[in-house]
Amino acid sequence: MTIKADVMVVTAHPDDAEFAVAGTVARWTREGKCVVYVVCTNGDKGTSDPEVKPEDLAAMREREQQAAASLLGVRDVVFLRYPDQGLEDTPQFRKEIVRMIRVYRPDTVVTADPYRRYIWHRDHRISGQVTLDAVFPYARDHLAYPDLLQEGIMPHKVREMLFWASEEVNYRSDITGTFDIKIAALRCHASQIEAHYSPEWAERLKGRYRAMAEGEDFELAEAFHRVEILR
Ligand SMILES: [Zn+2]
């Protein structure tokens, strides 16, 4: 019924995890950590091609996400299949995230920073907010969902959260040794990446991760706002 994961990554869309945290995920799995993904929407609006049917796009993006996750050594990918641009902060969505946290029992949960200002994808804002709320206090409190207890799904305390795309970075993760596999994982998302891909694009991305590592004793970093959950 339950599986002990070290890390759960909750994303709005297929490909968010690869942009945000794939270098860190690859390092973690190389260190032997168990990482799982929860992908909230099916990404069926992520195209500018008027010929592509949304249902075909959604199916393609699941395959791409699965391929990227396999390459990175991610153990499971759970697809919640909400419509792209359709996430809302509902009791049902929150409960689904709580269920995943309680089933996989991660120490670390990684998601989008809901408090990024102004231009920010609504699905990112809402998935980040709902995940934060699900971690604390809903996954922790046994009285939050008595029906989950009856299913044998017990409360769980997450120890830390990492938020990507944060305007308040306080944690930089070394991806110097995993940048290349991050690029390879990004390229699994062919429907999103291949039209822009070039070695120069990868170099520009590298420049961004080099800037994020400024002040550290390693070359390339993914950057997060890290919160420890003490209670
Ligand atoms: Zn996204």
Image (tube, rainbow, N blue to C red):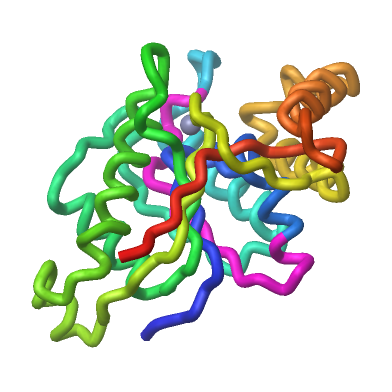
Q: Quadrant of the N terminus?
A: bottom left
- Locate residue 195 relative to residue 144 in the image: left or right: right
Q: Is residue 134 magenta?
A: no
- Measured as percent of width and height from the top left, residue 217 is found at 85, 42
Stretch in magenta: 28-46
Task: Identify which residue, 189 or 101, lies in the foreground.
Answer: 101
- Locate residue 229 relative to residue 222 in the image: left or right: left
- Measured as percent of width and height from the top left, residue 108 is found at 50, 61
- Locate residue 210 relative to residue 93 in the image: left or right: right
- Residue at x 40% of width, y 82% of height: 2
Q: How many marks?
A: 0
Figure check: 13 above or below 212: below
Task: Identify which residue, 91 or 192, lies in the foreground.
Answer: 91
Figure check: 108 above or below 187: below
- Measured as percent of width and height from the top left, residue 44 is found at 42, 32
Q: Is residue 41 magenta?
A: yes
- Residue at x 42% of width, y 37% of height: 55
- Residue at x 14% of width, y 85% of height: 150
Figure check: 146 above or below 20: below
- Measured as percent of width and height from the top left, residue 161 is found at 46, 52
- Residue at x 64% of width, y 55% of height: 69
Image quadrant assignment for residue 175: top right
Q: Quadrant of the C terminus?
A: bottom left
